[in-house]
Image (cartoon, rainbow, N blue to C red):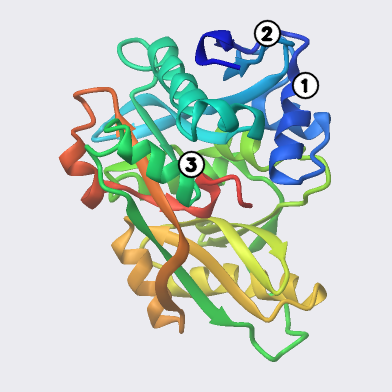
Amino acid sequence: MGDSELTVRPLQPGEEAAVNQAFNEVFQQHRTLAEWYWKFGPPGEPKFVMVAWGPQGEPLAQWAGLPVELWAFGQRLLGAQIVDVFAKKQARKSLGAAGAYLRTMRAFHATWCGPGGFSLLYGFPSAKPMLLDQKSGEYVQIPDLAIPVFRRPASGKKTRPLPLGLRFGLDEEAADALWERVKQRCRLSVVRDGAAFRRRYTARPGVVYHHVVAWERGTPAAYGVFALQPPAVVWAELLWDGESASALEKVLGEGERLGHRAGCRELAGWLRGDPPLELALQDLGFEVAPHPLVRWLGRSFDPRIPPELVPDALHCTMGDSDLV
């Protein structure tokens, strides 16, 4: 099979099962089609999935993006998280490691990025795709960035009185209020308001996200979204008003309490780009170190997101990935 035998084009309705099956084969997963639709949106919604098809109509490579709203230097722009990137063995044997992958990547760029499209692409690629991206010369304007991971051993107390002022479940108004506080100190971030929390952290097949909000004097002061990933309970999101350490500790303490039920031994999460929260977590006993494997990689397609400003401006949590 030569490079000319590949057909590279966007995914069409009715092809979802084929690309999900190819994903499962490559990554040795058992993702259901229901979860694919949760991730990429239900039938009828636009999909940003570029596929390289072989001569028999089989998917051989894929580049896919999940649209996200960005808060970028004082304005709302459209970005995409790159996910589910692969090139199957059949493509790699005759085309080399880069052929199908790079054609599919560049078709994604040409179709959906730039003026009127995605202003920023970002993702958390494994080592081989990251190397291909960088060797291509198309992902060198922004260096790959370390992901700080905060960890604290879970408290030995298996039961504790429930603190006053905690509320549970998705609370879009609380998320909206806290996001307004957070975005004042974050220059480049995925938007983390109530609508974003509803889309990202509800209705995922087989996964439960735990929403915890600490209120003080009638105002939300801290909001955590937790998931159980034994041996850790992890926060996907952590919004904080920047003032109440007691509210932050109440939310984190509830995360620990959730973890005890599943035998979790530590509380952990990613965080970069929110210095007051980073300092507050260290004051509460968290240790921080770069993730040993995962790094952030991105590319700007918009002068309103200057590449040279991204390393110092980027705000990132585990919820920006598809690992939680």
Report the side of 72 relative to 56 (left or right).
left
Q: Nearer the viewer, residue 50 or 103?
A: 103
Residue highlighted by disc 1: 18
Residue highlighted by disc 3: 192
Q: Are marks 3 and 2 in contact (CB under 8 Å)?
A: no
Mark 3 surroundings: few (<14), some (14-19) or many (≥20) residues within 10 A: many
Q: Residue at x 47, y 41 (%)?
A: 129
Disc nearer the start of the sequence (1/2): 2
Above or below 307: residue 311: below
Q: Residue at x 49, y 20 (%)?
A: 104
Judged from the image, the secondary structure of the residue bearing numbered disc 2 is loop
Q: Residue at x 75, y 14 (%)?
A: 15
Residue highlighted by disc 2: 12
Above or below 281: residue 321: above
Q: Residue at x 64, y 32 (%)?
A: 88
Mark 1 surroundings: few (<14), some (14-19) or many (≥20) residues within 10 A: some
Amino acid type of the residue tagged 2 in the rendering:
Gln
Q: Nearer the viewer, mark 3 or mark 2?
A: 2
Amino acid type of the residue tagged 1 in the rendering:
Ala
Q: Residue furthest bottom?
A: 156
Q: Are marks 1 and 2 in contact (CB under 8 Å)?
A: no
Distance from disc 1 to disc 3, alpha carbons, whole Å, reads 32 Å
Q: Position of residue 198 (x, y in %)?
A: 64, 36
